[in-house]
Structure formats: structure tokens, C-alpha cells
């Protein structure tokens, strides 16, 4: 029997406010509801999720460090840190854990400062613009990628 895949789901700043935060952009679901959908998808995919939301860059960086040797993949919506945080990008680069970047909104249809992602060059890929579905699509893409790659 193959070992169950373990995936770390990281939600960045202000995503704890989903449901009430600019619902016309980010949708009506709360973070808890999104996490519930992710857990349902994880059960279908037979993967174990560890989910964390933080408004603090350092907490997200520590969580990325802690994936090394424990989790096989990272699903991340770094919120505004996507566009500003070299430190989060460096942490992802350091641990070399395959990462999928997701965004609820289509960041390329929005303000110019949201068009650049420090995470994108390090990620396997990015899913942006499908609302809460971006998370489940991202999880599926990550699992497919990991199942197709030999374990390190
Ligand atoms: C976001 C897009 C970011 O630009 C923004 O700062 C967020 C959410 C998204 O999921 O669409 O906080 O990552």
C-alpha cells in the first residue's frame, strides 16, 4: 500500500475575513466553508491536509519550513504577500516542496500591482480567478502532479 500524501494548505493575510471582505471580488463563502470543501476534496483524493491561516508573514514562513520532510506538497494563497514577500518566496525555494499557488480573484484583471507574483516562478503552477473553486482545482492539480512524480 502506498503512503497517504500529506499536503499543507496555507492561507495568508485577510483571508480569515472571507465572506464579509469584498464579497463581489472574493465571493460569499467563509474561510471555514472553503476549508470544508477542501477537506471533502482531500477525502475523495485520499490525502491528509494540514490547514493554517495567518496574517503574519513570519508564521507563514515557519509553516513553510515545517513542511520539509513532513508534507509532500503546499497549496498556498499568500494573499497580498504574493505581491510583496521575497521572504515567503525564499522559504518555498529553500524547502523545495512542490507548491501550487491559488487566488480567488483573477489577479491579472485587477490593479497592476497584483499582476506580479513572487511565488509564481517557484510554483508548479498557479490557479487564479475561479473563486473558491481555485482551491479545489489547485488541490487536484497538486495531487495529480505528486502522484505522477516519484517520491523524494
Ligand atoms: C488574493 C489576491 C490578492 O491580490 C489579495 O491581496 C488577496 C487575495 C486572491 O485570492 O484573489 O488577499 O490572493
Image (cartoon, rainbow, N blue to C red):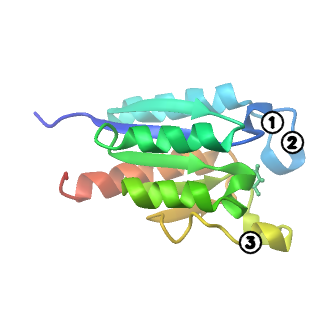
Q: Mark 2 points at which residue?
A: 23
First in sequence, mark 3 or 2: give its number: 2
First in sequence, mark 1 or 3: give its number: 1
- Label 1 vs label 3, nearer the camera: 3
Which is nearer the eye, 86 or 81? 86
Q: Please provide percent x and percent y for residue 5.
A: 29, 38
Secondary structure beneath disc 2?
helix
- Label 3 vs label 2, nearer the camera: 3
Q: Can residue 43 be seen in this view?
A: yes
What is the C-alpha distance between the residues marked 1 and 3? Answer: 23 Å
Q: Please provide percent x and percent y for residue 115.
A: 74, 72
Q: Residue 115 carries which label?
A: 3
Residue at point 61% right, 66% down?
Answer: 118
Q: Can residue 98 be seen in this view?
A: no
Residue at point 77% right, 66% down?
Answer: 114
Label 3 C-beta lies within 8 Å of the nearest ligand 1 atom: no
Q: Mark 1 points at which residue?
A: 28
Q: On the rendered structure, is 142 left or right of 56?
A: left
Residue at point 81% right, 70% down?
Answer: 113
130 in relation to 7, above or below? below
Secondary structure beneath disc 1?
loop
Secondary structure beneath disc 3?
loop
* Residue 7 lies in quadrant: top left
Q: Are marks 1 and 2 in contact (CB under 8 Å)?
A: yes
Residue at point 57% right, 63% down?
Answer: 119
Q: On the rendered structure, is 104 left or right of 70?
A: right
Amino acid at each position: 500500500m502506498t503512503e497517504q500524501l500529506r499536503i499543507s494548505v496555507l492561507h495568508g493575510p485577510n483571508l480569515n475575513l472571507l465572506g464579509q471582505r469584498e464579497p463581489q471580488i472574493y465571493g460569499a463563502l467563509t474561510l471555514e466553508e472553503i476549508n470544508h470543501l477542501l477537506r471533502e476534496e482531500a477525502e475523495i483524493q485520499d490525502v491528509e491536509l494540514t490547514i493554517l491561516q495567518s496574517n503574519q508573514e513570519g508564521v507563514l514562513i515557519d509553516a513553510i519550513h515545517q513542511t520539509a520532510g513532513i508534507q509532500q506538497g503546499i497549496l498556498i494563497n499568500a494573499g497580498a504577500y504574493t505581491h510583496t514577500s521575497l521572504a515567503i518566496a525564499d522559504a518555498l525555494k529553500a524547502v523545495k516542496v512542490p507548491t501550487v499557488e491559488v487566488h480567488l480573484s483573477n489577479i491579472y484583471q485587477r490593479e497592476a500591482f497584483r499582476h506580479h507574483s513572487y511565488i509564481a516562478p517557484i510554483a508548479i503552477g498557479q490557479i487564479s480567478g475561479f473563486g473558491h473553486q481555485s482551491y479545489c482545482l489547485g488541490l487536484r492539480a497538486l495531487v495529480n502532479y505528486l502522484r505522477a512524480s516519484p517520491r523524494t
